[in-house]
Image: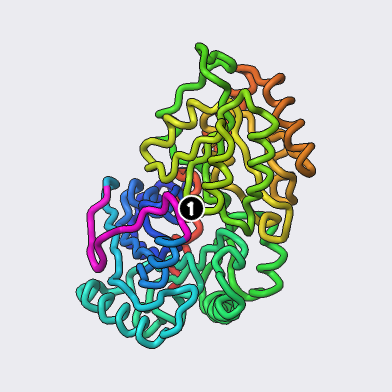
Amino acid sequence: MNNTITQHMILDRKYHFLFFGLTSFDSLPQREQALAAECARSGHRVDFIEIAPSLAGRSHALFNRVFAPLSRDTGFTRDSTHPNLRVHTPPMLPTGFRNSLTPGIDRILFQQWFQHRFSKIDFSHSIVMVMMPLWWNNFINRTLVNPYLLVYDVSDALEVQSRSDATMRRLLASEASLGQEADLITYSAAEMDADLQLRFPDTRRLFLPNAVSSEMIARIEITSPHKRNGQRPSLGYIGATCGKWFDKELMLAVADSFPECEIEIIGPVDTSYKEACARRSNIRLHGYVSHERLPDHLQRFDIALIPFFSNEITRVVNPLKLYEYSAAGLPVVAIRSAELEQYASLLYLADGRQGFIDGIRRASHEDTLVLRKNRRAFAERNTWRHRVATLIEYLHPQVLSV
């Protein structure tokens, strides 16, 4: 049979996906939400289970976070704006996933809600995507959910998900079990491959880098650089400001080095960092920005930033923001990492604080409309539509063989 016809037949077959997420669906854009939304756009039925809200998590956010929106409702289901996608928020748990002091109670409450919510679904015809290892054998297992295929998606180093040594031990134990039981491991960074091969030599793996949605690309108009109409140049960052990978001091140094520029940070910050930013008149904290409004902010940026530490966490980070920045054609200045070396032709890679600041100056001087169109072309070659097509094409023969 013609290969093109065969591929269309594969992509035309529709599945039921059940995503167990890392966070809430309406948080800052993340890989899990993008994959789920694109599966739905492609005609697959998708149920997305958000991480359960918890008393401990809300208390932490209340006293330590600024711009960290929390859902007021729990135990509910809603239809999203995407066709075929339903988002489910579990009920409030006493202490929650990452630092649970009462895992037994948390597990019982979650499983009771889950069994009631999905009592009419036969999971033997479903593909389960687990995005956070602590789900497995803590809240779900094959007794509760026994799918056609079990997929473990690895988006970052495990340290990103842990808040304590105890949590890290639980994560490692859950991941060891999940990785061995999974039918497939998908992963976002090429730098993860050797480690995954070492830890899970008998589990199939599929490299599935991050991407950007075609819808976001379509909403961003590529314009010539340096047309400010009297406005100050804008240096922008989109993402969390977590201390494990985000270099807070580097971002403050950028503000001090470029007083003539507006430094725009989109995403949650903690209270102490908000106070440090408030001492710089050129830093603007936007807080949480919905997915739909991100293109408007990207179009206002002149240069986009990835101010990460250089460590074992960032070594295996394939930044989602790289693709979003590229959709706007923006020059991107980033701290060098093994993973980002693969995209060196698109980036201004820097070693250390001074190199980062020098990279911003160089990016500003060299930016042209031609370069912006080249970066846009990279984004157009790397959409979530392409990623989901790759995933479905890989999964299809696996489903048929089960």
Q: Residue at x 41, y 53 (%)?
A: 68
- Image side of residue 304 versus residue 142, left or right: right
Q: Quadrant of the C terminus?
A: bottom left
| Residue 262 x, y percent position in the rendering | 56, 28
Of residues 253 and 81, the one drawn nearer to the viewer in this rendering: 253
For the record, the magenta segment spans 64-80
Q: Residue at x 58, y 63 (%)?
A: 160
Outermost residue to the bottom = 104
Of residues 383 and 226, the one drawn nearer to the viewer in this rendering: 226
> Residue 150 magenta-drawn?
no
The colour mode here is rainbow
Disc count in the image? 1
Of residues 4 and 379, the one drawn nearer to the viewer in this rendering: 379
| Residue 36 x, y percent position in the rendering | 39, 54
Outermost residue to the front = 279
Q: Secondary structure at mark 1?
A: helix
Q: Is residue 91 visible?
A: yes
Q: Residue at x 60, y 23 (%)?
A: 372
Q: Residue under circle 1?
A: 31
Q: Is residue 10 visible?
A: no
| Residue 70 x, y percent position in the rendering | 34, 57
Q: Is residue 388 above or below residue 374?
A: below
Q: Is residue 152 above or below residue 345?
A: below
Q: Residue at x 43, y 32 (%)?
A: 295
